[in-house]
Image (spheres, helix red, strand yellow):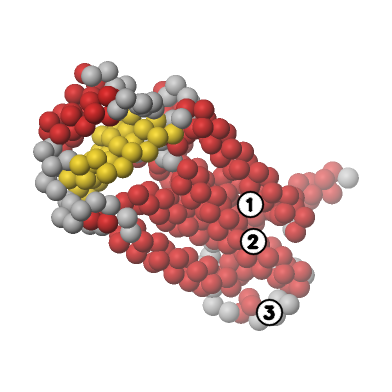
Amino acid sequence: MANPNLMNQKQIIDVVKFRWLWLAISAVLLIPCIAAIIYLMATQANHAPVKLGIDFTGGTILQYAVKDDVTVDDIGKIREDMVKEGFMTPVVQNINNDNAGQVSKDGIKNIISVKTGFIDDKTGETTAKINNIVSDHVNSAELVQTTSVGPSLGSELLKNSVVALLLAFLGIVVYISFRFKADYAVITLLSLIHDALFVIGVFAIMSIFSNVYVDALFITAVLTVVGFSVHDTIVVFDRVRENNRFLAKKYTFNEIVNASVNQTLARSLNTSITTLLTLGALYIFGGSTTKEFIFAMILGIAVGTYSSIFFASVLLAWDKEIRDKKAAKKAVAA
């Protein structure tokens, strides 16, 4: 049951009054992301919104443990020599990893990651050619891991990942429509699109400027973020519905939304901050192979917390205001 003294309690923040500020912040966050997504979709042959890793396109990754220091020039020369040898669009990266000793021998300072097209190398000739190129510029390089994904498997994984995302969105809309109302479901969907666009857009920007490629873990991160975001939004919406049921006769819907958000604010922030602290520790002290996954989670949970408080609630109040005005006009016309 709603607290009858809720409106007399101190309001930490007035989300409805400053709705244009929150919507402007969302616009500032999303416009660069949307621009980067459109740019990649227009310029990439597969029209993907981010650069897809070998999980989705098929290819081979070779990782070399290195005891010596590796310079940017070394990485550039390896890439140039691979192109000269006929390797199409190779991606060569130097991964600084304090935990690299777990991958190979003690004393490993760096790991050179070489991504290229799928290598069906029964004789070992192609791998040997890449080994020679790397060894020409980094003397202590030792091949420690080779991972290959076939093109057909990568394409199937990409299709299944897209289907999984669409089913998640559809399931959420159906549940919210049943649990609340259709307008709540639409606003929840807009909030989820807001969060997903931000996470995908940031990785699109990173793809353009830092040559970052996404893998299957990225889809896992997006699905996790969607689940976290909708959970946070449902908590706010449930409180709005409960308060509106008992307080609608005395207060406006905007006042009820504002009070409900403030009522759940501490819970939302505490949940998100503790989660972000854990993810931050994993990002700083975890292995390099999970950094992009953790980073996507950090982005998603941060923007999901923001959207449930400042985006979804504002849209809910705005939608009710518009519908009430339409109803009033119809009543006058009648």
Where's residue 248, x and y in %? 75, 68
Of the residues tagged 3 and 2, which is closer to the observer?
Answer: 2
Give the mark, 3 or 2, whose residue is nearer the N terminus.
Answer: 3
Task: Please report the residue visible at 44 percent of the width from the left and 34 percent of the height from the top.
Answer: 149
Judge left or right: residue 116 versus residue 195.
left
Where's residue 113, x and y in %? 27, 39
- Above or below, 33 against 178 in this view is above
Residue type for callout 3: Asn
Where's residue 58, x and y in %? 44, 30
Q: Which residue is mark 1?
A: 188
Residue type for callout 2: Ile
- Secondary element at tag 3: loop
Residues at marks 2 and 1, CA–CA distance in whole angstroms? 8 Å
Quadrant assignment, res 215: top left
Quadrant assignment, res 10: bottom right
- Above or below, 133 against 12 in this view is above
Residue type for callout 1: Thr
Residues at marks 3 and 1, CA–CA distance in whole angstroms? 25 Å
Q: Residue furthest right?
A: 334
Residues at marks 3 and 2, CA–CA distance in whole angstroms? 19 Å
Q: Quadrant of the N terminus?
A: bottom right
Q: Residue furthest front?
A: 123
Task: Please report the residue visible at 18 percent of the width from the left and 33 percent of the height from the top.
Answer: 134
- Secondary element at tag 2: helix
Q: Which residue is mark 2?
A: 234
User: Would you say the residues marked 3 and 1 are in contact, meaning their CB atoms lie under 8 Å apart?
Assistant: no
Towards the viewer: 44 or 217: 217
Q: Which residue is mark 3?
A: 3
Task: Please report the residue visible at 28 percent of the width from the left and 41 percent of the height from the top.
Answer: 63
Task: Please report the residue visible at 66 percent of the width from the left and 68 percent of the height from the top.
Answer: 239
Residue 39 in view of the camera: no
